[in-house]
Image: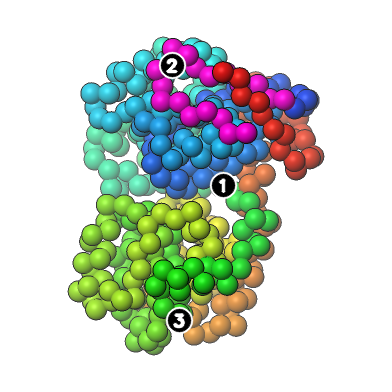
Amino acid sequence: MPAKVVDVDPGGVASYEPVHAPNQRRELRILHLTTDSTRVSGAEQLLIGFGQHASRFGWRPTFATLRSAGPVNRAFAATGWPSHGLGLNGLADVAPVLFRLFRLVRALRPDLVHTHLHHASVIGAMLRPLISVPLFQTRHYSDYLERFGTPVQRTLDRWAARRCAGIAAVSDAARGQLVEKEGVDPSRVTVVENGVDWDRLARRQAAPGRATLRRIGVPDGPLIACMASLQLRKGHATLIDALARIRQRVPEVQLVLLGAGPEEAAIRRQADLLGLADRVHLLGHRDDAHDLCAAADVYAQPSLEEGFGLAVIEAMAMRCPVVVSDVGGMTSTVEDGVSGLRVPPGEPGPLGEAITALLVQRERAERAGALASERVRSRYSLTAMLARYDACYRTLLGEAIAAPPVSEEEPPCRIVH
C-alpha cells in the first residue's frame, strides 16, 4: 500500500511501522534528503530502489525533497514509505525549510541523514550544528560543479562535503574530485558504484518500443537513443553534430532523445540549422523510457561530465550496444572495444564514427550488447549496491555488519497516521 505524500508543515508527521518480522540486525531509521520533486532522474531512480528493498536490510526510510511535493514524492511513497516536500522555491524559503527539516528530524529521530545532490547536501550541512544525527552524503557527480558551477556553488560544495561523517562516491572519478580537489579526508570517502535491477531490464524486448515509436510518429529505421536530461553537460550538441555525419553513411537514421531540460530549445534550433529536424525526436520524460531505449540499435551518452552514468548501465542491461564519452564513471563502466565504445568528449567526429560502426556492423553490435548485459549482471547489481550502503551505514554508526537476508521477497509495510 503506498505511503502518504506530505507537503510539510511537520507539526503532524506521519509515522510508520513495518509488518514483517525483524531480521538479525538493528533496524536503522534513515532520512533521505534530495533536491528536486519534479523529475525522476538517475539519483531519484536509485532512491526508489532504496525504498523498494529497505526491509531486506533492516532500514526504515523516510524520503524528503527540498521542493514542494511532486511526482518524485509520489514515486517514493509508492515504495511504501513516507515522503515529504519541504517547499523550497527560492532563497527566501531557506530559513523556513531549515526549520521544517529540523522538526522532521526531531520527530523521526533517524539514526542518520543521507543527502543526495548539491542543494540537499548544502541544506543538510547547514542543519548539522542543530542536530546530533550524523550526516552521510552520496556524491552523484564528479567534476560537474568544477566545470559548470559558479564559484559560490563550488565553495558550498566543498564546505558541505567536509561536514559529512561519511561520503559514498559513485565512481573513482567522483572520489578523486572529493579527495584531490575538495580536500576531503580520503578515509571518509568510499566508492559505491550504482546498481540496477538487471532481471527487470534484461527482459525488455525491442518490439513494444518500436510499436510505440511508430504510434507517436517516429519512422522506422536505424535508431539511436539517448536517455538524459537536456543539460549542457550531457553533450547533446555534440550528438546532433555527429548525427549529420552519421546520416551520410546511414541515410534513414533516427535519433530519439528521452529527457527534458533547459537546453531543449537550443537542441531544436541546432537540428533545424543542420536539416535534421525530421530525424531528431525530443520525447521528454516518459514512463516507458526503458521500452523505447530497448528498441534502439545504439545507445549514445555523449556527456561532457558524468559522475557515473546510470542510464548507460540500464541500456547495457537491455543488451543495447553503447557509445559513451570517455569521462567520469563511464571510463570504468564501459570496456572500450568490448562492452561498448568510448570516445573523446565534445568531438562529433569520433562519436559519429563509433556510432556508425555499430549501426553498420550488426554482428559486432550484437556481440557488444550481449557482453554489456553480462557485465551489468555480474558487476552492477542493485542488491550488491544496497549491501555496500548498508555496510557504510553500519560502519559509520559503529555496528557489526550482519549478512543480508537471503529472501528476495519484499515484505509489505503498514502506514500509521
Q: CA distance from mark 3 to mark 2?
A: 53 Å
Label 1, secondary structure: give it.
loop
Between the residue at mark 3 and the residue at mark 1, the CA separation in whole angstroms equals 35 Å
Residue 92 in the figure: left or right of residue 308: left
Farthest residue in the front direction? Answer: 215
* Label annotation for residue 193: 1
**For discs 3 and 1, the disc positioned in front in the rendered view:** 3
Q: Please state which of residues 209 and 236 is positioned toward the viewer in this rendering.
A: 209
Q: At 21% from the left edge and 67% from the top edge, which residue is drawn?
A: 269
Q: Residue at x 26, y 64 (%)?
A: 267
Quadrant where the image shows the N terminus: top right
Secondary structure found at label 3:
loop
Residue range corresponding to the magenta coloring: 1-19
Quadrant, the C terminus = top right
Q: Position of residue 133 (x, y in %)?
A: 51, 16
Q: Is residue 275 above or below residue 412?
A: below
